[in-house]
Image (cartoon, grey):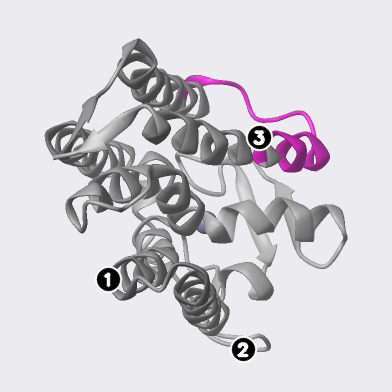
């Protein structure tokens, strides 16, 4: 899943007035933010195989440290605990922890059976919605749109940046989503990993956006 994760990050604005879009994006996308680092380091593995699913040509062969159920649960707990130690905000700590774990659940819906449960498990899971492109696109878009609605409903711009930055985030994500669907397969795995690192930009954009907005 791609923009669905961002939909949940945007929707988290409803959870508490002090919820921050930057941290929400980091949490909801945490598994995909560390995945390119692990693949470039050679610890996780994927290949490009057009046709492996109808919607994405990526074959996730080995990614237990970023995308096993046990890893996402542990990362969610660690994320929430570290946030709580820094900010002493229990509600947000729980929301961010749950967002980290939600990534696995949303990926489970869309991925073919490639998601492991433990670091070493041979059995892999996934409902494979990527083989039903229309349903997959509709579900992801609905989560994204609901998130956008909640974010703009629960916060207001304090200046022009507060108005345009979140809109920029939403438009860029929608464009990437469309390009992923209609674009050609990526040229190489390293091109995929390096472009996935760009996801960190959205964390920064999220913080910048929320610096210029206030919760209502
Ligand atoms: Zn993922």
Q: Quadrant of residue 163?
A: top left
Disc 3 packing (10 Å; few <14; some 14–19; many ≥20): few
Instruction: Determine the residue positioned at 51% across, 77% down.
Output: 85
Q: Is residue 156 magenta?
A: no
Q: Locate residue 183 relative to residue 215 in the image: left or right.
A: right
Q: Label 3 near label 1: C-beta < 8 Å?
A: no
In this view, which residue lies farthest toward the top?
160
Magenta span dominant secondary structure: helix
Q: How far is disc 2 from disc 3 in space, using C-alphas?
A: 30 Å
Residue 61 horizontal/vertical position (percent): 69, 64
Q: Nearer the viewer, residue 88 or 62?
A: 88
Choose mark 1 or mark 3, whichever is in front: 1
Residue closest to the eye, 165 or 85: 85
Say which residue label 2 marks: 121
> Which residue corresponds to mark 3?
198
Task: Give the residue furthest to the right.
Answer: 41
Q: Position of residue 92 (x, y in %)?
A: 33, 65
- Classify 53 as above or below 211: below
Q: Is residue 205 left or right of residue 158?
A: right
Instruction: Looking at the image, tell me whether mark 2 or mark 3 is earlier in sequence order.
Output: 2
Q: Earlier in the sequence, mark 1 or mark 3?
A: 1
Residue 167 point in image, percent of width and height: 34, 19
Q: Which residue is mark 1?
A: 91
Question: Does 169 appear above or below 27?
Answer: above
Specify start and end residues of the magenta stretch as a single range: 182-196
In the rendered view of the protein, which quadrant contains the C terminus? top left
**As drawn, 190 above or below 172:** below
Q: Residues within 10 Å of mark 1 (few under 14, many from 20)?
A: some
Q: CA distance from mark 1 to mark 2?
A: 33 Å
Residue 185 among those drawn in magenta: yes
Q: Label 1 to label 3, Cα distance in Å? A: 29 Å
Q: Residue at x 44, y 75 (%)?
A: 84
């Amino acid at each position: 899943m791609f923009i669905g994760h961002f939909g949940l990050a945007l929707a988290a604005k409803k959870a508490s007035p002090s919820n921050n879009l930057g941290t929400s994006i980091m949490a909801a996308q945490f598994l995909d933010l560390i995945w390119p680092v692990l693949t470039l380091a050679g610890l996780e593995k994927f290949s490009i195989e057009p046709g492996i699913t109808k919607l994405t040509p990526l074959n996730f062969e080995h990614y237990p440290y970023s995308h096993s159920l046990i890893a996402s649960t542990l990362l969610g707990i660690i994320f929430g605990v570290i946030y709580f130690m820094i900010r002493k905000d229990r509600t947000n700590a729980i929301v961010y922890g749950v967002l980290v774990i939600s990534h696995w659940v949303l990926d489970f819906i869309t991925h073919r059976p490639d998601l492991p449960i433990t670091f070493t498990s041979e059995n892999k899971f996934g409902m494979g919605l990527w083989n039903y492109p229309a349903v997959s696109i509709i579900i992801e878009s609905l989560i994204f749109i609901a998130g956008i609605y909640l974010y703009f409903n629960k916060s207001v711009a304090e200046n022009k940046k507060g108005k345009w930055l979140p809109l920029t985030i939403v438009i860029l994500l929608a464009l990437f989503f469309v390009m992923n669907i209609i674009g050609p397969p990526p040229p190489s795995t390293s091109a995929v990993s390096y472009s996935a690192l760009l996801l960190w930009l959205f964390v920064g954009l999220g913080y910048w956006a929320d610096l210029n907005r206030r919760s209502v």
